[in-house]
Image (cartoon, rainbow, N blue to C red):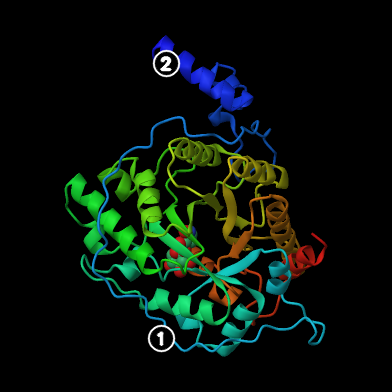
């Protein structure tokens, strides 16, 4: 950078906010990335100074765009989920989580799949306690776009139909990700321009299909490694780092209403990855890229979850950029714990409580989603090969102490 351009940038940054100005001027008093505490350790790193909300200072890049592919229209008529009457607070003294959440305009949700919804007990619990559902797999590439010119929205449409019947919001997941991709994509040989068109058409087709029915989309999922470097995904290799900004641009073109989210795991506390996420979204905001928020997945263990202080610090600095912050996939693994089952459940409840209350106390955090309804339907045992009990309800659908903790927090006056 020439001395002249640097001086100009400094003036802009100083006008924009003192802390950013200090850093650009060489102050860089924040912890160097390589000294930040890894996620699994319990000490709280000192929080970054919180920069003020940035205004765009770089020109918005001009990306190529595309027309959506021909694809089936949204079809809610084939699914006849009857509304399930939520449990009233006057019936047997029972109060539902969603009723309390709705008093605060808050969304509590779980991820789900359409084949569970035919189970009446499951569906009843889901609709009674939650006002949001997340598409656990139903909107992923391998499901919705199994062949280059074929889309299958039947599973996603079923989730939307259930949500509509029961007054629930839908969290769309995930548009640009490196897993659960169909073979034609992973084995495909195309030019960079063709890859750009493939990703663009996918996003515009899928987001356009659900336009008006999705509260928030995970536009880009898990783009970073834990050390903060970009993950070597298909999209990075084929398009380059700008695939991230492009994906947000195309998603906005297809649905101006849905919140557009960058979603990540192990980026909940203060560490190299959350630093990278922060820099990414801050940079996108400065360029006028339409990112609305950050999803913190929160797949954690009984031991070593991010401390409350670093969680709050991370959420607050994102919120102070003007972004929303969501907890998007929470579960708390119990495997390898050495305590008694009752103690394990108490520790688990406390971890849920801390995460939920950190969200409640962050002005821009109004979504809390667990990754599955009951322990019977968690992805963790299959993924790890070990039995586990990471969710809010046990295998029989009975509320666990973790659920009671959330209920308790929402019962307190805001
Ligand atoms: C998981 C699903 O829960 C499983 O059913 C599937 O087999 C694999 O993917 N981060 C994400 C989610 O963003 O999409 C993953 O979901 C869990 C980790």
Marking on residue 313: none
Secondary element type, mark 2: helix
**Image height of 221 relative to 371, above or below:** above
Q: Position of residue 334 (x, y in %)?
A: 64, 63
Q: Position of residue 193 (x, y in %)?
A: 20, 46
Q: Nearer the viewer, residue 392 or 23?
A: 23
Label 1 SS: loop
Q: Nearer the viewer, residue 276 or 15?
A: 15
Give the percent coordinates (x, y) of residue 182: 28, 64
Image quadrant where one finds the N terminus:
top left
Labels 1 and 2: the sequence-earlier one: 2
Q: Can residue 178 be seen here?
A: no
Quarter residue 174 falls in: bottom left
Identify the image quadrant of the C terminus.
bottom right
On the picture, is 135 further left or further right than 142? Answer: right
Residue 287 vs 85, above or below: the answer is above
- Give the residue at x 39% y 87%: 78
Q: Which mark is residue 77?
A: 1
How busy is the neighbourhood of tag 2: few (under 14 within 10 Å), some, or many (20 plus)?
few
Q: Is residue 6 left or right of residue 344?
A: left
Residue positioned 67% across, 35% down in the render: 45
Q: Is residue 206 left or right of residue 340?
A: left
Q: Position of residue 180 (x, y in %)?
A: 36, 62
Position above or below: 150 against 2:
below
At a point 35% along the width and 74% down the height, the residue shown is 153
Q: CA distance from mark 1 to mark 2?
A: 59 Å
Residue ID for mark 2: 5
Q: Nearer the viewer, residue 404 or 5?
A: 5
* Residue 72 seen: yes
């Amino acid at each position: 950078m020439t001395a002249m351009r640097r001086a100009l940038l400094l003036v802009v940054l100083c006008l924009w906010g003192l802390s950013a100005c200090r850093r650009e001027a060489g102050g860089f008093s924040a912890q160097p990335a390589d000294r930040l505490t890894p996620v699994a350790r319990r000490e709280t790193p000192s929080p970054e100074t919180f920069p003020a909300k940035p205004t765009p200072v770089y020109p918005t890049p001009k990306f190529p765009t595309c027309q959506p592919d021909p694809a089936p229209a949204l079809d809610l008529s084939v699914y006849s989920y009857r509304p399930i009457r939520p449990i009233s607070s006057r019936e047997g003294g029972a109060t539902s989580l969603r009723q309390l959440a709705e008093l605060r305009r808050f969304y509590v949700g779980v991820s789900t799949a359409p084949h569970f919804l035919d189970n009446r007990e499951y569906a009843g619990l889901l609709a009674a306690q939650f006002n949001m559902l997340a598409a656990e797999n139903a909107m992923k590439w391998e499901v919705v776009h199994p062949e280059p010119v074929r889309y299958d929205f039947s599973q996603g449409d079923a989730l939307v139909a259930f949500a509509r019947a029961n007054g629930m919001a839908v969290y769309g997941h995930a548009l640009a990700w490196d897993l659960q991709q169909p073979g034609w994509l992973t084995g495909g040989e195309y030019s960079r321009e063709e890859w750009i068109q493939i990703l663009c058409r996918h996003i515009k087709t899928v987001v356009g299909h659900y336009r008006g029915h999705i509260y928030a989309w995970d536009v880009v999922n898990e783009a970073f490694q834990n050390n903060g470097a970009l993950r070597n995904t298909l999209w990075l290799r084929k398009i380059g780092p700008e695939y991230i900004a492009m994906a947000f641009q195309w998603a906005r073109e297809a649905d101006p209403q849905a919140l557009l989210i960058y979603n990540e795991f192990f980026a909940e506390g203060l560490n190299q990855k959350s630093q990278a996420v922060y820099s990414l979204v801050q940079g996108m905001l400065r360029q006028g890229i339409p990112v609305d928020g950050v999803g913190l997945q929160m797949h954690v263990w009984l031991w070593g979850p991010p401390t409350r202080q670093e969680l709050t610090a991370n959420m607050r600095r994102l919120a102070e950029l003007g972004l929303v912050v969501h907890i998007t996939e929470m579960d708390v693994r119990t495997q390898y714990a050495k305590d008694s089952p009752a103690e394990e459940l108490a520790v688990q409840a406390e971890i849920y409580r801390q995460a939920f209350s950190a969200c409640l106390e962050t002005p821009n955090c109004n979504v809390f989603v667990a990754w599955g309804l009951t322990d019977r339907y968690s992805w963790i045992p299959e993924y790890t090969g070990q039995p586990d009990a990471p969710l809010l309800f046990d295998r029989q659908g009975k509320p666990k102490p973790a659920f009671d903790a959330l209920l308790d927090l929402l019962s307190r006056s805001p």
